[in-house]
Amino acid sequence: MIEILFLGTGASIPSRERAMPCVAVRCGTDIALFDCGEGSQRQMMVSPFSFMKIKGIFITHMHGDHFLGLPGLLQTMGLSGRKDKLTVCGPKGMSAALDSIFSVCEGNIGYELDIREAEHGLSVEFGGFSVSAFRTDHTAESFGYKLSEKETRGRFNKEKAIKLGLSPGPDFSKLQNSETVKGVTPEMVMGPPRPGCNLVYSGDTSPCGELSDAAAGVDALIHESTFSDRESGLAADHKHSTSVQAAETAKACGCRALFLIHISNRYDNKGEIEEEAKAVFGNTFAPDDMDMYKVSKDSVRRV
Ligand SMILES: [Zn+2]
Ligand SMILES: [Zn+2]
């Protein structure tokens, strides 16, 4: 099960309703952050997620709406006592940009930054999940990311364990840690391992083959939807996507759910964006800032 928190769902410039792009995904207690627009740390601070639990930050491209919140967030983590290593992945130029900012700002971050330069096929492993990069098609060098939750342990059948003569407490813990107890093997009381969920975060992009390959069969596709269908010419000129193109990708790739973000502030009413996408792909959501969804193999629901 993964939890997706939409911290910022706007595009290019903020509006009263929408902050700059930033999406947090939690697997267990660990968090991956996708893009970090200006103000993301404040959004996170008033959310149920702790920025101290972030294990990796993934920047799609160096346009300011996706990157300018990163230096402030990194600094705040240091001031808040972070000691754990943090992985930050982004395109060429991100490392130099951070070096340049921190060389003129006072203070030392105080923890290790593991900076990775994104390239197509790069994969970064964390405890409960991995994140891989794929190339996308935008006006600057750009990448999308795919998060894959690792397989989790099968369900423990308490009733069966009791029937086999075991008692709650240490016996149960040992079985769940793959030990045999009083002749009862873990296989006798544990269900099969549960497959993890996966998602793709598009960043800014025109529809492209690399994105479709990554999105094949994913549980959640978080796709930019800067323009409505009637402005498809503008979308093509600026290498963005329309809501209908996002929905067509979700449908063609057999995704389970589509989330539309990076909504331009030219749309007062997101209804237009959401409805035209839904007409193509029914399981479409257009989240507002701070909306949270739980995605499991059984359901996708807002919480
Ligand atoms: Zn953008
Ligand atoms: Zn952009």
Image (cartoon, rainbow, N blue to C red):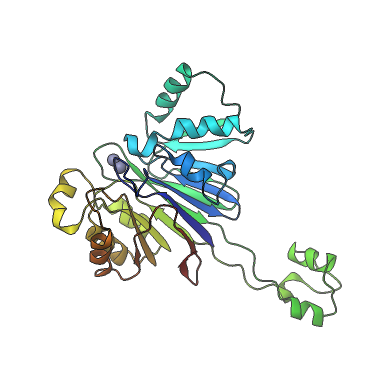
In front of the other: 104 or 1: 104
- Hey, which quadrant is residue 37 in on the image? top left
- Residue visible at 33% across and 34% down in the picture: 64
In the rendered view, would you say 122 is above or below 187?
above
Ligand 2 quarter of the rendering: top left
Q: Position of residue 137 (x, y in %)?
A: 26, 45
Please give left or right for residue 223 compared with residue 157 in the image.
left
| In the displayed structure image, the side of residue 93 where residue 137 appears, left or right | left
Q: Which residue is drawn at 34% across and 60% down?
A: 286
Residue at 33 percent of width and 47 percent of height: 10
The residue furthest front is 16
Q: Quadrant of the N terminus?
A: bottom right
In the picture as drawn, the residue positioned furthest to the bottom comes out as 163
Question: How many marks can you see?
Answer: 0
Position in image of residue 220 (x %, y %)? 41, 61
User: Where residue 54 sits: x, y (%)?
Assistant: 55, 43
Percent x, y for residue 66?
36, 39
Vertically, is 268 above or below 188?
above
Q: In which quarter of the image is residue 186?
A: bottom right
- 140 w.r.t. 175: above or below: above
In the image, is 268 to the left or to the right of 53?
left
Instruction: Give whichever of 102, 191 is nearer the camera.
Output: 102
